Image (tube, rainbow, N blue to C red):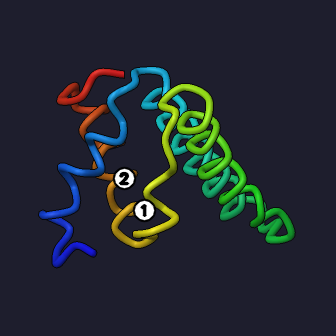
């Protein structure tokens, strides 16, 4: 286990070296944000299940088929979730290529 997110994040990035995997994460995270806005605007809370489907579905496809590793979510769910959003922000800012 990792003592802090700062300690975990380099490992997280090493598990996302494949560009297609990072793109899958980016697509899934973007869809999560779009779906969340849609839920808030429409009030159709019966579709909340779309959030993990988009987020984890795209990310896990990236890991299993392109990165060929096991998602960090299975061992470090909270740090992994934080890592998803930190990496997403870094991609938006051009700090990480996707």
Q: Secondary structure at mark 1?
A: helix
* Above or below, comparing residue 33 to residue 82 in the picture: above
Of the pair 14 and 59, the residue shown nearer to us: 14
Would residue 37 appear left or right of 48 to someone viewing this image? left
* Above or below, comparing residue 24 to residue 55 in the picture: above
* Above or below, comparing residue 8 to residue 38 in the picture: below
Q: CA distance from mark 2 to mark 1?
A: 7 Å
Q: Position of residue 14 (x, y in %)?
A: 26, 40
Q: Position of residue 73 (x, y in %)?
A: 48, 62
Which image quadrant: the N terminus?
Answer: bottom left
Q: Position of residue 59 (x, y in %)?
A: 56, 43
Which image quadrant: the C terminus?
Answer: top left
Q: Position of residue 48 (x, y in %)?
A: 75, 66
Residue at 50% x, 51% y is 71
The residue carrying pointer 2 sits among few (fewer than 14), some (14 to 19) or many (20 or more) residues within 10 Å by Cα, namely some
Which residue in the protein does label 1 denote? Answer: 81
Residue at 13% x, 64% y is 7
| Image quadrant where residue 81 sits | bottom left
Of the pair 46 and 14, the residue shown nearer to us: 14
Residue at 30% x, 44% y is 87
Of the pair 52 and 12, the residue shown nearer to us: 12
Would residue 60 appear left or right of 95 to someone viewing this image? right
Q: Secondary structure at mark 2?
A: helix
Residue 67 has which mark? none
Residue 85 has which mark? 2
| Image quadrant where residue 6 sits | bottom left
Q: Is there CB contact under 8 Å for labels 2 and 1?
A: yes
Residue at 69% x, 59% y is 41
Of the pair 25 and 47, the residue shown nearer to us: 25
Of labels 2 and 1, the one closer to you: 1
The residue carrying pointer 1 sits among few (fewer than 14), some (14 to 19) or many (20 or more) residues within 10 Å by Cα, namely some
């Amino acid at each position: 286990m990792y003592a802090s997110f700062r300690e975990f994040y380099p490992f997280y990035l090493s598990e996302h070296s494949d560009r297609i995997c990072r793109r899958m994460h980016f697509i899934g995270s973007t869809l999560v944000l779009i779906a969340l806005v849609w839920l808030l605007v429409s009030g159709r809370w019966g579709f909340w299940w779309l959030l993990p489907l988009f987020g984890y579905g795209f990310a896990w496809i990236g890991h299993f088929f392109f990165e060929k590793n096991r998602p960090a979510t299975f061992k470090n769910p909270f740090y992994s979730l934080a890592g998803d959003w930190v990496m997403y922000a870094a991609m938006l800012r051009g700090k990480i290529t996707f």
